[in-house]
Amino acid sequence: MMRMKTRNEPLPPHIDGGVGRRVGGGEKEWELRPGGMLVQKRTDAEQNPAAPPPNIRVRVKYGSIYHEIHISSQATFGELKKKLSGPTGLHQEDQKLYYKEKERDSKTFLDTVGVKDKSKVVLQEDPISKEKRYLEIRKNAKLEKAAKSVSEISLEVDTLAGQVSALESITCKGGKVAEKDVVTLIELLMSQLLKLDSIIADGDVKLQRKMQVRRVQKCVETLDVIKVKNSNPTSNGAHAHAPLKQKHSNGEEHSNSPNQEQEQPSRNSASVVITTQWEMFDSALPLPPPPPTNSTATIRPAQPTFTWDLL
């Protein structure tokens, strides 16, 4: 094997731009590799990288129990909390670590505050952080439940909206839809609307709920229009073909069809002429009062008449 040669000389001309000057005004050590490549000699620091920081044993007191944790001397208190979650059963956000009777932040390094091998750290539970975390968990659970409910209602509304579109297309083509189907769809849509009103949500879930409410309301309005269109021809036909009743002076009612009404004037045309021209009378003269009835008239006795002679 060819031995490596080390020389203290300036850079070669083909490397130093053809000048061959010394870089930085000082000498550089170069070594020749077996392949003939001339490279800068490595220093001892590059050949021997720095050793990793040593691990230490930290004694953590929780209640009346001591836990011995092996951790890097340059770790943070937050990393120590993560390792304490397993043996203590406390969440890392619910822990408070005290070293030298002072609470230490999770971002503080162990070596900066003087934690060494076999140092003692006290662990306490933080009830306020625990309560906040439970409230946050409950809030997230409610949001997830609300989002799931809105998603299920959205699928149901999609199905009902398709049925509404089918009925609308039938009515637009002049067809007739069963009123029972329209009423059933309205009831189903209103039940979905009640479910949406019972959902309490915030943020994106609230926007999704509002969007579904608008969809349901639009479908109900479309069904109302279909119902009106479906009932208009029936009502007009009923009025057109309904039998006409005529009451005569003798108190008898006769139902005459349109054909009968046309035949009746032809029969009586020879004797009676029907006209709609009314004569106007002068109402200046007062009408005489009605005669008193027998019940109000008083009967007076007749007065006797005498003939007197004048003397």
Image (tube, rainbow, N blue to C red):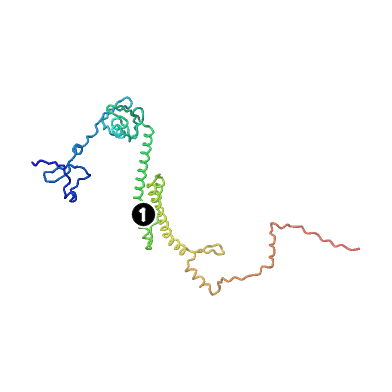
Place residue 43 in its image quadrant: top left
Please count the marks in the image.
Answer: 1
Secondary structure beneath label 1? helix
- Examine the rendered structure and indicate whether residue 53 appears above or below residue 310: above
**Alpha-carbon neighbours of circle 1 within 10 Å: few (<14), some, or many (≥20)?**
some
In which quadrant will I find the C terminus? bottom right
Residue labelled with disc 1: 161
Image location of residue 117, percent across then percent down: 27, 28
- Return the residue found at the far right: 311
Q: Nearer the viewer, residue 20 or 130?
A: 20
Q: Quadrant of the N terminus?
A: top left
Q: Position of residue 293 (x, y in %)?
A: 68, 59
Is 83 drawn above or below residue 254 in the view shown? above
* Residue in front for this viewpoint, 281 or 78: 78
Q: Is residue 311 above or below residue 68?
A: below
Question: Looking at the image, which residue is at 82% across and 61% down?
Answer: 305
Q: Nearer the viewer, residue 228 or 87?
A: 87
Q: Amino acid at mark 1?
A: Ala
x, y (%) of residue 26?
21, 42
